[in-house]
Image (tube, helix red, strand yellow):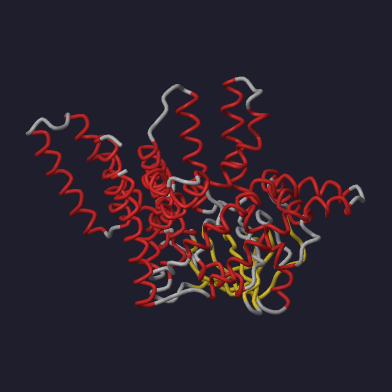
């Protein structure tokens, strides 16, 4: 880390504050930035061009975020009768089917019941369905939950037509991959298959409430949110093919794979961050200008929020950024503290560093996590990583055998994957029950920090 890296990180943090702030706070921040730039110019700390650039980029951030938020005010409400585009996979929530529909330029969350529910349950992302219902605003104070998803209100569904208009070709190809992953894991029990698709492609629409609660309470919820690990595995699996292409063609092919994988995972904020960072890292190396990691993270956040300012309201986006920063800054130093054996030192270092990285966001949103989550991650992450690495190609191959009437071979191929999925679920169930709260949990976290300090002191004295 150099001083310039910290300055870039600080600048991106200010940009995020400008994006999230109200008009009054935005003006105050811009005035403070302008005064700071004038003082820095007077002391010859920065050039005039840099000062002008900083003021312009922060002003752009304020204007861009206010423009995005104005779209939530300018929304058409009332009755609607016509075609709507399906934006998210239908998901069972109790007796309702939840999905997101796009009507014109506005998105609405839908909770369907009865006959409209089972008709909507079979809809695919990108298809256009005939609907009739009422567009309503959110209750005051609840709209912030939906901002990052660009959802502007609720749609009270009354009727769903039988006919559907097909999705664009790229979305049909994405849906085909998702269907093949499910077909390849058909030999799994229902809950195992739901967890497998969550680990591999981030599809958690069929996970039961008890499973969701177990992963949240055990500190393993990040495993079913596609992140940089999944992106790395996809690029690693395709690297033998990509490496055979010429330089320019390899650049376009790699970026195309990243965009395609983002679509497969339904454009989740965490995978947007991971794919953007992977693309920037690849381009920096391809053009002979490799970039240091923290600078790369900062530029990734800036680019993502410039393109979509509403990501500044996404909890998943900030948790992904926090975990990456924790790994960047803390994984190697913590691994040196543990020292031996090396594989365990790296695993513990990465686990603790990622946990510490997401800690500020987790505490602010969900409260203090259980300290036992560190042990749960050490036990579950390596196996989950193997499932992510091997599960996607193996499930596609298993689906291919099933299409040729050789489903028995596919089932045997997927047996080790099934055992890995079951192990991850067992770890989540056990450590969800070993969750501590209150003063006991704080004491355990204090013990973790004291242990790190003691090991650091012993390592430096040797």
Look at 59% across and 62% down and name the residue there: 101
Which is nearer the eye, 266 or 160?
266
In the picture, which quadrant includes the C terminus?
A: top left
In the picture, which quadrant includes the N terminus?
A: top left
Q: Quadrant of residue 131?
A: bottom right
Look at 27% across and 40% down and name the residue there: 6
Could you say where residue 9 lies in the image, as x and y percent from the top left? 30, 43
Q: Quadrant of residue 317?
A: bottom left
Could you say where residue 260 lies in the image, as x and y percent from the top left? 62, 42
Furthest-right residue in this view: 405
Furthest-left residue in this view: 42
Furthest-front residue in this view: 462
Could you say where residue 7 lies in the image, as x and y percent from the top left? 25, 39
Q: Is residue 64 left or right of residue 342?
A: left
Q: Is residue 194 left or right of residue 31?
A: right
**In the image, is residue 139 above or below residue 131?**
below
Furthest-top residue in this view: 246
Q: Quadrant of residue 10?
A: top left
**In the image, is residue 69 above or below residue 459?**
below
Q: Is residue 419 left or right of residue 298?
A: right
Could you say where residue 408 lies in the image, as x and y percent from the top left? 89, 54
Which is nearer the eye, 166 or 13?
13
């Amino acid at each position: 880390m150099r001083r310039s890296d910290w300055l870039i990180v600080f600048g991106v943090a200010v940009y995020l504050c400008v994006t999230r702030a109200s008009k009054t706070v935005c003006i105050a921040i811009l005035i403070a930035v302008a005064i700071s730039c004038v003082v820095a110019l007077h002391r010859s700390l920065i050039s005039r061009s840099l000062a002008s650039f900083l003021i312009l980029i922060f002003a752009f951030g304020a204007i861009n975020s206010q423009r995005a938020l104005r779209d939530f005010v300018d929304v058409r409400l009332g009755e609607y009768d016509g075609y709507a585009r399906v934006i998210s996979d239908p998901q069972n929530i109790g007796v309702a089917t939840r999905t997101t529909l796009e009507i014109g330029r506005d998105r609405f969350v839908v909770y369907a019941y009865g006959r409209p529910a089972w008709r909507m349950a079979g809809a695919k992302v990108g298809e256009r369905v005939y609907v009739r219902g009422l567009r309503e605003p959110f209750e005051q104070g609840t709209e912030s939950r939906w901002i990052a998803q660009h959802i502007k209100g609720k749609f009270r569904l009354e009727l769903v037509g039988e006919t559907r208009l097909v999705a664009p070709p790229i979305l049909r190809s994405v849906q085909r991959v998702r269907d093949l992953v499910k077909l390849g894991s058909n030999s799994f029990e229902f809950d195992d298959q739901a967890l497998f698709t969550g680990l591999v492609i981030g599809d958690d629409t069929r996970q039961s409430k008890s499973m969701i609660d177990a992963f949240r309470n055990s500190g393993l919820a990040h495993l079913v949110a596609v992140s940089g690990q999944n992106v790395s595995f996809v690029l690693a699996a395709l690297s033998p093919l990509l490496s055979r292409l010429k330089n320019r063609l390899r650049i376009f092919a790699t970026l195309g794979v990243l965009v395609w994988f983002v679509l497969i995972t339904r454009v989740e904020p965490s995978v947007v961050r991971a794919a953007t960072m992977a693309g920037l890292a690849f381009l920096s190396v391809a053009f002979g200008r490799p970039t240091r990691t923290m600078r790369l993270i900062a530029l990734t956040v800036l680019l993502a929020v410039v393109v979509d300012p509403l990501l500044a309201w996404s909890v998943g986006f900030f948790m992904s950024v926090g975990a990456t920063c924790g790994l960047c800054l803390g994984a190697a130093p913590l691994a040196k503290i543990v020292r031996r054996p090396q594989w365990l030192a790296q695993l513990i270092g990465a686990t603790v560093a990622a946990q510490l990285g997401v800690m500020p966001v987790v505490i602010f949103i969900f409260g203090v996590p259980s300290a036992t989550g560190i042990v749960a991650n050490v036990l579950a992450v390596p196996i989950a990583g193997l499932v992510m690495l091997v599960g996607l190609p193996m499930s596609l191959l298993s689906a291919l055998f099933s299409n040729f009437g050789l489903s028995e071979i596919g089932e045997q191929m997927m047996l080790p994957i099934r055992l890995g999925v079951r192990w991850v679920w067992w770890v989540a169930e056990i450590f969800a029950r070993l969750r501590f709260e209150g003063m006991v949990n704080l004491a355990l976290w204090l013990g973790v920090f004291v242990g790190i300090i003691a090991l650091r002191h012993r390592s430096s004295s040797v």
